Amino acid sequence: LVLSWNDLQPEDARLILPALGSLRMLEELYLSGNNLHGTSGIFCNILPFLTELKVLKVYKCCMTSGEIMSIGQALMHHCKNMCKFDFRENPMDIEQRLKIQDILPFSTFRETGTRQKQEGQVSSGYQSVPTSGSRRVRRMHPVALLFLDQPYN
């Protein structure tokens, strides 16, 4: 679910985030470029319901290191499939950032797909994913998602 760069303010997030708890099969949540300062408690309350979450991007969301740490610890506890937690460009110094990276194995500042590129597994465009039944779901390539998560100029 991509909600990045929608100029959400904390009061907007307090209305929207609790509803996301009903999306129990949600795997990726992109919230970058919104002001989410002071909403870590809401994240911690909905994460027990988002057990399938694999990617959370809160890049440039005005969140403190304490908020990022709280969310990260809740992700570790509730989201066992988590593989990427992107919290770049939030107001914290390098020591705080490194401490969070050391504690949270899925936090990253590296490009998506770096490991896959080294292993020669990156494809271009869309990927078809089998689902139950005869339908196939088309998924965007992770590199395409990087462009969706950037501000539009």
Image (cartoon, rainbow, N blue to C red):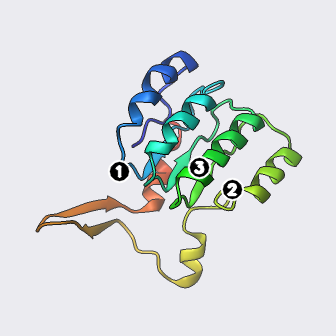
Horizontally, is 139 left or right of 88 in the view?
left
Vertical side of 11 occupied by 35: above or below:
below
Pick the front one: 150 or 98: 98
Residue at x 50% of width, y 24% of height: 13
Residue 86 placement (x, y as % from top left): 62, 49
- Picture mark count: 3
Query: Marks 1/3: CA distance?
Result: 15 Å
Quadrant of residue 104 within the rendered picture? bottom right
Q: Nearer the viewer, mark 2 or mark 3?
A: 3
Specify the farthest residue to the bottom.
119
Residue 109 has which mark? 2
Query: Marks 2/1: CA distance?
Result: 25 Å
Residue 1 placement (x, y as % from top left): 39, 43
Number of residues whose C-alpha sits closer than 10 Å to that of mark 1, classed few (under 14), some (14–19) or many (20 or more) = few
Specify the farthest residue to the top.
11
Give the mark, 2 or 3, whose residue is nearer the N terminus: 3
Q: Nearer the viewer, mark 2 or mark 1?
A: 1
Question: Label 3 belongs to which residue?
Answer: 75
Residue at x 50% of width, y 32% of height: 5
Residue 25 has which mark? 1
SS state under label 1:
loop
Quadrant of residue 60 within the rendered picture? top right
